[in-house]
Image (cartoon, rainbow, N blue to C red):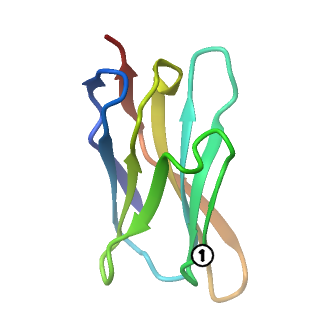
Amino acid sequence: VQLLELGGCLVQPGESRRLSCVVSGIIAGIIVMGWYRQVPSRERELLATFASGGSTDYTASVEGRFTISREQGKNTVFLQMNSLKPDDTAVYYCKLVRQTMIGRTFDYWGQGTQVTVSS
């Protein structure tokens, strides 16, 4: 399984940006996909999740500004980011959790994409 994040860039405060996470490889058994971000010297922060049943969840710092979605029938997950702030500057990562037929779970990560919010 490989994950590729796309869409990182430099934006000004208040602008919007959509990140994409394209999944390839063995994709059966996906339990949940999520977006995280990380800044230097801090732990990776969970932002949003999209479960296999369609439910979504957000961390308080982005709820109402960010939206996670999944393209129907395709293995692409998006993160729509609105009203971006300088504090949103980070490397953004996509994560996939997959469960096998015998119940084992595996985590997969993308390589990350840089989002910089600055005037």
Left or right side of 73 for 109:
right
The quadrant the N terminus occupies is: bottom left
Left or right side of 91 for 97:
right
Give the residue type at disc 1: Ser
Left or right side of 61 for 86:
left
User: Which residue is most to the top?
Assistant: 119
Q: Position of residue 57 (x, y in %)?
A: 64, 62
Foreground of the two, 62 or 43: 62
Q: Quadrant of residue 76?
A: bottom left
**In this view, 99 is above or below 19:** below
**In this view, 66 is above or below 92:** below
- Residue of label 1: 55
**In this view, 26 is above or below 5:** below
**In this view, 101 is above or below 14:** below
The quadrant the C terminus occupies is: top left
Q: Position of residue 54 (x, y in %)?
A: 54, 80
Foreground of the two, 84 or 22: 84
SS category of the residue bearing label 1: loop
Q: Position of residue 26 (x, y in %)?
A: 41, 74
Kindly identify the residue that appears in the image at 27 percent across and 28 percent down: 9
For label 1, the crowd category at 10 Å Cα-Cα, with few meaning under 14, some 14 to 19 and many 20 or more, is few
Kindly identify the residue that appears in the image at 57 percent across and 29 percent down: 38
Kindly identify the residue that appears in the image at 73 percent across and 82 percent down: 103
User: Which residue is most to the bottom?
Assistant: 101
Q: Position of residue 70 (x, y in %)?
A: 39, 70
Kindly identify the residue that appears in the image at 47 percent across and 82 percent down: 28
Tell how many labels: 1
